[in-house]
Image: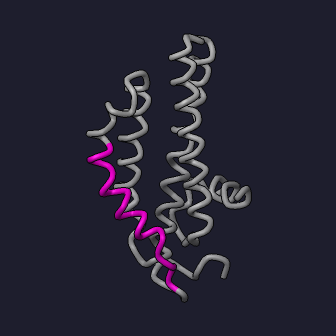
Amino acid sequence: MIRAVAQALRNYATFRGRTGRRAAWWFLGFFVVGNFLLVNLTKFALLGEVYGLAKWASLVSWFFFWSMILPMSALTARRLQDIGKPGALTILPTAAVMLVSVNERRLITQGYEALIPVFIVATPVFLWFFYWLARPGDPGINAYGPPPGA
C-alpha cells in the first residue's frame, strides 16, 4: 500500500502511460479513507465545540483534499489508459469527487442527509468508473504504451 501511494505521489502530474489495478485501488482507498477521517474529525470537533481542533482539522482536511486532486486525476487517467480508454475521461470522476467533497465540507454540520442530492448526481459516475477501474488492463502494448511493470 505504501509503495502504491508513494508511486502515485511521485507521478502526481504524469498523465501519460498506464497504471495497474492494484496500485490504483490502493491510492484511491488512501484518498477516500484520508478524506473521510479528516472531514469527520472536523465534524466531531465542531459538534463537541472544540473549535481550535475543528479549525486545525478543517485546514488539514482542505489541504489534503486539494493536494490529492491532481495525483488522483493523473492516476485515474493512467488507469483508464491501461484499459484502452482515453485518460481525458478522468474529468468526470474528478468533477464528481470535487462535487461531493466540497459540499461535504460546506454542509459539515448538517449531517449526511444534506448530501443526498449530491450523492444522487455523483453515484452513477462513480459506479461507471468503478466498473472501468476494476477491469483488467490490456495485456500487451496498447495506444498508451506498454503494460505497467513491463
Q: Residue at x 60, y 29 (%)?
A: 60
Pinpoint residue 19: horizontal percent, then vertical percent: 57, 69
**Looking at the picture, does residue 90 appear above or below residue 100?**
below
Is 106 or 94 nearer to us in this picture? 106
Instruction: Point out the residue furthest to the right here.
Output: 3
User: Which corner quadrant holds the N terminus?
Assistant: bottom right
Placement of 144 over or under 128, stated as above or below? below
Based on the picture, tell me whether residue 114 belongs to the magenta stretch.
no
- Compared with residue 113, is residue 56 higher up or lower down, i.e. above or below? above
Image label count: 0
Residue drawn at (58%, 36%), measured in percent from left and top?
A: 37
Main SS of residues in magenta: helix
Q: Is residue 28 left or right of residue 90?
A: right
| Residue 130 spot, x, y in % from top left | 43, 64
Reply yes or no: does residue 130 show up in magenta.
yes
Question: Where are the magenta residues, as a range?
Answer: 119-138
Residue located 35% across and 41% down the image: 99
Q: Residue at x 50, y 84 (%)?
A: 138
| Closest to the observer, 120 or 30 | 120
Colouring method of the image: one colour
Q: In the image, residue 134 lies at what x, y percent?
A: 48, 71
Q: Quadrant of the C terminus?
A: bottom right
Q: Position of residue 20 (x, y in %)?
A: 58, 72
